[in-house]
Image (cartoon, rainbow, N blue to C red):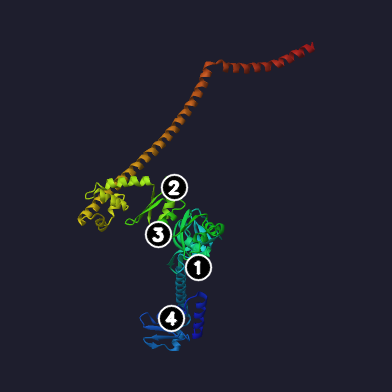
Amino acid sequence: MNGQEILRIVDAIHRDKGIDGEIVFAGIEAAILSAARKHYGEDQDIVVKIDRKSGEVSVFLDSEPLPQEELGDLLGRIAAQTAKQVMIQKIREAERDSLYTEYNELRTHLVNGVVTRTDHGVATVNLGKVEAILPKSEQIPGESYRVNDRVRAVVLEVRKMGSRIKVVLSRNHPDLVRRLFEVEIPEVADRVIEVRSLAREAGYRSKVAVSCYDNSIDCVGACVGVRGSRIRTIVDELNGERIDIVRWNDSLQVLIPNALQPSEVEDVILCPLLGRVIVLVREDQLSLAIGKKGQNVRLASKLVGWDIEVMTQEELDEQLERSIAAFSQIAHITEDLAETLVSQGFFSFDDLSVIEPDHLKELSGLTPEECEEIVLQAEDHAEREEAEADKRKMLDREAKRVEREAAELDAMTGESLSEVDGEQEVESVEESAESTEAADPSADEAEVTGTEAAEQEGHSEPQGEEAGNSQATG
């Protein structure tokens, strides 16, 4: 192994595998060092160096350079085989590290691949250099894949596993919608339109808040496209998932009504101490604002980063009265202080138990000791209410269990009664048949008599023939 051959090997590995030349040189040095330790012993002080320009190998044994003859013997057949194994291992590790770095930089980015196999819902996707997995939990609900299907997904996680890397893909992550916007909408890719916030429930609905630095451009209209052409492409990629595009505004008073579209909002009440927003709507808009199974308000809360509680004006008035009456039961809380707390969004003892004593002191003007006592009493009331709620849930579960067992027992009783009725019906039929036979015994006798008469008639026919013959003889 001369210097030119080493340089040629390093250059070939660098070009073919994309591994830095210095890493390859270090791998060859480690391989020669391993072969030298095997030849001279592990206790020897051995140093191996390779000239990066000429490729010449120098080996130092106890700080003394090794003669060329011994160096040639060292790099002989056995030593070369050992060096080859170590070098291959080093190259594989370097290749793994290179792939890990490459795909780790692609996390949350969009990649394309082809499904090579599926196993119990888990799809293996070929990305070109590596094979990634798309777990069932990271697929859009209702999706199924077959071999050779093309897949678009974001890189969720990259891990080192031995000499390989494991790449996990996701199609239900919110960043998939963000990356599809960048691919399908040029203004988003050019940063003219910015996706400010995004909330998603994969397979069902997403809300995307966008803004534009150029006031002459309608950011919502640009994302929708002519007759919905742009957004339709994204919806098709997501298997029909509904996407609401919301105009971003720095004011929550404007952003929250936009986020709750298509419902109409009458008023927005901010409760900064609790990070809560109370949204008032008309009675006919309540179900629309909440959405199916609370989906609309839940996505809007994720989009704006605040807890949103939707109610009508009547419900708010009732809640205020209940809260004021409940807070008035706590020592040191007057009716005026209770109204102040309720106006800040504290509706329950659980809310009051998390208030900072300093904030309570600013609102009430009470001493720190009195504020601490109020918080402690609120915690006690909250724990009691929680215990009562748990007890009610347990009683409800027990009642449902009893109802279920009663229904099963009724079903079993009905089946038993039907079986008894069937057996009684069979017995009644048999009894009726026996009673008929007992009531008319002549029927069997008549049947027997009829049989005997038939036999006698059969015997009488030959007698008639004999009579006829005798007459003919006469």
The Cα atoms of the two marked residues, 4 and 3, are separated by 63 Å
Circle 2 — which element? Answer: helix
Asked if the residue at tag 1 contacts the one at tag 2, i.e. Cβ–Cβ closer than 8 Å, the answer is no
* Amino acid, disc 4: Glu
Circle 4 is placed at which residue position? 29
Query: Residue at left 45%, top 67%?
Result: 165
How busy is the neighbourhood of tag 2: few (under 14 within 10 Å), some, or many (20 plus)?
A: some
Task: Work out whether 28 lies above or below 243.
Answer: below
Circle 2 is placed at which residue position? 285
Dot 4 or dot 3, earlier in sequence: 4
**Nearest to viewer (mark 4 / mark 1):** 1
Asked if the residue at tag 3 contacts the one at tag 4, i.e. Cβ–Cβ closer than 8 Å, the answer is no
How busy is the neighbourhood of tag 4: few (under 14 within 10 Å), some, or many (20 plus)?
A: many
Instruction: Residue 64 in the image: state x and y as whole percent.
Output: 38, 88
**Left-right relation of 301 to 434:** left
Residue 2 visible in the displayed image: no
How busy is the neighbourhood of tag 1: few (under 14 within 10 Å), some, or many (20 plus)?
A: few
**Nearest to viewer (mark 3 / mark 2):** 3
Instruction: Residue 343 in the image: state x and y as whole percent.
Output: 31, 51
The Cα atoms of the two marked residues, 3 and 2, are separated by 23 Å
* Amino acid, disc 2: Gln
The Cα atoms of the two marked residues, 1 and 3, are separated by 26 Å
Front-lying residue, 146 or 451 = 146
